[in-house]
Amino acid sequence: MFNRRRRIVFALFALVYLFRAVPVQAASEATLPLRPPIGTSGLSPLSLAGVVELARRNFPRILEQEAEYRASQRNISLRRVKEYLPHSMLSYQDVAATHNRLTQTVFSSSVLPTTPGPGPERVQMNADAFSAMGFIVDWDPVDFGLHRARIDKARAESNVSGAQLKLTVLEVMVQAANRFLEALVMREQVAVAQANVQRFRDFSLVVHAQVRAGLKPGADASLADSQLANAENDLIRARLNDELARASLAYAVGLGGEMVDINEGGLLSVPQPTTSIAAIEPQYRAHPLTLKRQALVDNERASLKVLQKEYYPRLRWLGGVNLRGSTFKTNRGDVPASDLSGVFPSVPNWNVGLMIDFPFLEIFRIAAEKKVVGERIAASDQALSLALQDLKTEEVKAQATYRASRALAANMPIQVQAAGLAARQAQARYEAGLGTVAQVAEANQILADSRVKEAVANVGVWKSLLMVSFVRGDLGPLLKTAAAVGK
């Protein structure tokens, strides 16, 4: 019985300990961060030009393309060395083997080593020592243009890499500028949402005062509080969108995981910039996209030129010196063969010669490859034509978007002014007892939407100019215009 009571008391103490430990553990878990904190970049607020320049210097994809382009440039020198550097080999051998010979003819094979010189008078299995050392130089400077064609092929590949780098730089700069403009819209939405919250807060105070005075029913106060809470929710969502937009902007400039701030630079205050960007005559052939497609065409043509130069004889100039040694006693006895000659070769020879290699059956392989490369050239030509059509189509779209965005930006102040007047009149009617809370809320919401649309329209002008600049392949005029606006 006593042991049973001890067990019960022990169980009660264990339960008390567990119940006391659970809140502590829950409290400690509640303090755990739901996500790692987002760091700040430490940069001053970035303007449009600053964002574009930072992306050009810092975005990893550009740095990757620059490294690949430098590698392709070095590959030209490497190819030149490979083509014109003579092949050479220095070799030394020590072998122990028998020297029984039989006159015969076989093809060269590593399994059947050559045994120069006369053999013994009878078969014997005693091993002799053999040694040899020498070098040879194999050079083919005359190849009827094949070396030059291969070097030009490496240069064409480098041109493709360089054109890709230019296109990547343009795309990254346009992406960064676009992310900046989107972040600018999100920031304006936060400002509009804050102003909307303040209006609803002021209106809620008016409604509560009239309810306390008995001039309005209590339901109006609840409805006003509901509209204020809805406006505050809109502000929370606007701030979320602002954070997301600035995070995307940080990624676009190569600072992923951090937060950057933006500087409007007067872009919203001057929605109608006096610029001649849209009037510049586009040079489609000079666009990085076209240059890349043209470089691909040239690369395939360089491959065809290599094939055209392959079906020529190859002239090889060879020369070398070698020393041989052996402990084998020849039948004639006129060649010294000391015991050390099996380790240190002592009989010298030199050789020079010209070899002409002509793989005449390669004509069938070359002809087949020419057909393949010819089709690739045709495909590359069509890709170039498609790139030109894409740019011309984007030009038409960009010009239409630019005209429409300018018209919208010019008309939005009228809409905002009218919406503001309607919001003031709705509140005045409510205070005079002629309107409802719902009418005031609707008028204020229309005003907030109008101001957001105004910001979108103003930024839309710059976005359309960004599209035009992309078709031109140069953001310089746009950045100069933006810098002039910010002064």
Image (cartoon, grey):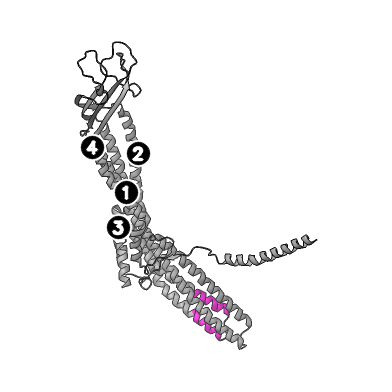
Query: Is label 4 or label 1 in front?
Result: 4
Residue span colored magenta: 422-447
**Foreground of the two, 320 or 280:** 320
Q: What residue did someone put label 4 on?
A: 85
Tell me if residue 456 can be seen: no
Q: What residue did someone put label 3 on?
A: 282
Q: Mark 2 or mark 1, which is nearer the start of the sequence? A: 1
Report the Cα–Cα distance between label 4 and label 3.
Answer: 47 Å
- In-image side of 105 versus 427 (left or right): left
Q: In which quarter of the image is residue 369?
A: top left
- In-image side of 88 versus 45 (left or right): left
Label 3 Cα neighbours within 10 Å, binned few <14 / some 14-19 / many ≥20: some
Q: Main secondary structure of the magenta part?
A: helix
Report the Cα–Cα distance between label 1 and label 3.
Answer: 24 Å
Amino acid at circle 3: Pro
Answer whether residue 425 is magenta in the image.
yes
Q: What residue did someone put label 2 on?
A: 375
| Local secondary structure at mark 1 | helix
Q: Is residue 98 above or below residue 202?
A: above
Q: Is residue 476 above or below residue 210?
A: above
- In-image side of 2 versus 279 (left or right): right
Q: What residue did someone put label 1 on?
A: 161
- Residue shown at 27% from the left, 29% from the top: 92
Amino acid at circle 4: Leu
Q: Mark 2 or mark 3, which is nearer the start of the sequence? A: 3
Label 1 Cα neighbours within 10 Å, binned few <14 / some 14-19 / many ≥20: many
